[in-house]
Image: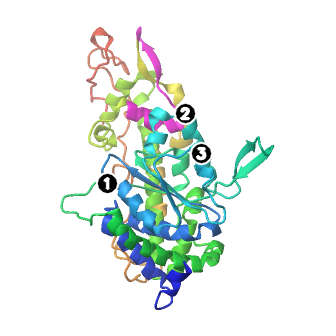
């Protein structure tokens, strides 16, 4: 790295070098947002001083479907980061023996869904890798194994930064220690340069060497820094962003503002799933009313009809039973066999939700949905308070020249005020039999038509 630093004609300009890394990334990759591109550039720079930091940030690159550019992003990042260890599959033993505590590599795990996918849940290899990736986020969490030849325990280091890319979400414990964003396919009219390893990788590596030379020259200073955090980040998010913000502050220019904007927006997006879960819990309390148990199909039919809610148009289709189960899983709520009038179907019991309603929705009335979703929205809105606006205005009222023209993070719920349909004083009744909360028609099947007379 020293040679690259000496090759610079003038003293290194951190902001210019970060801009160069940013331009290199966006030349070959379509990012889902300006904040995601800024985070990727900052992550690449941070890897060159990883040995000085308290936390080894993870970068999780999700893709909803194939051909969204996640593998291409990893290819370009591999030319910018320090000591890339790029692989699509690796054993736990091989991984830990590849980590030099004085010069840790950047673990770059592509196709991670083939390791952590749903069908492989509980797989011993996947669990070992997940444990090592989790342990390696902080220092002094070695991988302990007994060496029969030496007749003693061996402590193998795990501390190293990592990039984890795959289709779908990664394990929650990995994402909780990471800067995350979801890639997307190119829209009509969007173009990027083709990336060819033999042709383009050498030029990308030169940019990485220049970036690394500057970061390495101030590594000690970066490791001792305690950057100011944007409001709204939880403790784990602050740990993950600490090193990236330290690099941004050292670079100067508009990067301190851009970095905090990226931290706030991406952290808010990461909280969106939790907000959706809280909204779902609130709406489910309204759906249940006084019922002790309901079939899943009955619950879904009612959720689809909730005004201003996302359940009727969930990523282009009505919410399905598996998606409902996935949203409820973090709260320890799973479907059961529910027997009603002698007929068994999958469903849920009211008693399964009581503690979650008390903890996350609040209150005891059936109209607590609005409060729960407003609380979730408020937690996310805190993340952008005091940050620059779309015009680049800094918190102190000054304009940060050159700051990206980006929009503020949008609310995660379905309307500006997270409105939930008011709950009727009297429960809805079955159109066929007239009984409150009764959903059964001919042949014991759930009634799909419920009168709206009782609803305002």
| Element type at mark 2 | loop
Between discs 3 and 1, the one toward the N terminus = 3
Name the outermost residue toward the bottom: 10
- Residue 435's place in the image compared with 331, above or below, is above
Q: Nearer the viewer, mark 1 or mark 2?
A: 2
Q: How many marks?
A: 3
Q: Which residue is mark 1?
A: 184
Q: Position of residue 67 (x, y in %)?
A: 30, 50
Q: Nearer the viewer, residue 134 or 345?
A: 134
Between discs 2 and 3, the one toward the N terminus = 3
Q: Position of residue 396 (x, y in %)?
A: 47, 80
Q: Quadrant of the N terminus?
A: bottom right
Q: Nearer the viewer, residue 53 or 366?
A: 53
Q: How is the image coloured?
A: rainbow
Residue at the location (32% across, 37% down)? 306
Residue at the location (34% across, 32% down)? 320
Q: Which residue is mark 2?
A: 122
Work out how far the residue at label 1 is from the one at label 2, CA to CA, in angstroms.
29 Å
Residue 92 image label: 3
Span highlighted in magenta in the image: 322-343
Q: Nearer the viewer, mark 3 or mark 1?
A: 3
Badge 3 local density, few (<14 within 10 Å), some, or many (20+)? some
| Element type at mark 1 | loop
| Residue 66 visible, this orientation | yes
Between discs 1 and 2, the one toward the N terminus = 2
Q: Position of residue 218 (x, y in %)?
A: 59, 79
190 sits left or right of 211 in the view: left
Name the outermost residue toward the right: 151
Q: Nearer the viewer, residue 79 or 449?
A: 79
């Amino acid at each position: 790295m020293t040679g690259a630093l000496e090759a610079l004609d003038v003293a290194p300009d951190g902001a210019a070098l970060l801009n160069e890394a940013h331009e290199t990334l966006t030349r070959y990759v379509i990012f889902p947002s300006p904040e995601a591109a800024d985070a990727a550039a900052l992550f690449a720079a941070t890897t060159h001083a990883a040995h000085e930091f308290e936390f080894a940030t993870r970068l999780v690159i999700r893709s909803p479907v194939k051909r969204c550019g996640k593998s291409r992003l990893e290819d370009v990042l591999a030319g910018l980061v320090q000591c890339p260890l790029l692989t699509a599959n690796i054993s736990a033993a091989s991984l830990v023996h590849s980590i030099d505590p004085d010069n840790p590599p950047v673990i770059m795990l592509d196709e991670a869904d083939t390791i952590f996918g749903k069908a492989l849940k509980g797989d011993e290899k996947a669990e070992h890798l997940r444990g090592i990736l989790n342990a390696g986020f902080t220092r002094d969490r070695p991988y302990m194994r007994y060496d029969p030849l030496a007749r003693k325990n061996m402590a193998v280091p795990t501390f190293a930064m990592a990039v984890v890319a795959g289709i779908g979400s990664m394990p929650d414990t990995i994402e909780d220690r990471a800067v995350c964003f979801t890639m997307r396919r190119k829209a009509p009219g969007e173009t990027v340069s083709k990336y060819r390893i033999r042709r383009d990788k050498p030029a990308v590596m030169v940019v990485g060497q220049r970036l690394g030379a500057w970061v390495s020259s101030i590594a000690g200073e970066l490791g001792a820094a305690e950057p100011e955090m944007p409001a709204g980040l939880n403790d784990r998010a602050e740990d993950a962003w600490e090193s990236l913000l330290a690099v941004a502050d050292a670079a100067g220019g508009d990067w301190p503002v851009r970095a905090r904007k990226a931290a706030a927006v991406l952290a808010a997006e990461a909280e969106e799933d939790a907000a959706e879960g809280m909204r779902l819990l609130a709406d489910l309390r309204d759906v249940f009313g006084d019922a002790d148990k309901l079939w899943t199909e009955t619950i879904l039919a009612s959720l689809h009809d909730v005004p201003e809610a996302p359940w009727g148009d969930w990523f282009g289709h009505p919410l399905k039973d598996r998606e409902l189960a996935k949203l409820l899983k973090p709260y320890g709520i799973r479907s059961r066999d529910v027997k009603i009038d002698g007929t068994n179907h999958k469903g849920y019991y009211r008693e399964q939700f009581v503690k979650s309603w008390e903890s996350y929705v609040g209150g005891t009335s059936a109209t607590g949905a609005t409060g729960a979703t407003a609380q979730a929205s408020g937690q996310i809105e805190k993340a952008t308070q005091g940050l620059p606006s779309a015009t680049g205005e800094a918190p102190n009222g000054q304009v940060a020249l050159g700051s990206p023209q980006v929009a503020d993070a949008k609310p995660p719920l379905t309307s500006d005020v997270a409105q939930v349909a008011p709950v009727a004083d009297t429960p809805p009744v079955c159109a066929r039999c007239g009984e409150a909360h009764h959903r059964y028609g001919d042949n014991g099947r759930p009634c799909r038509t419920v009168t709206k007379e009782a609803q305002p």
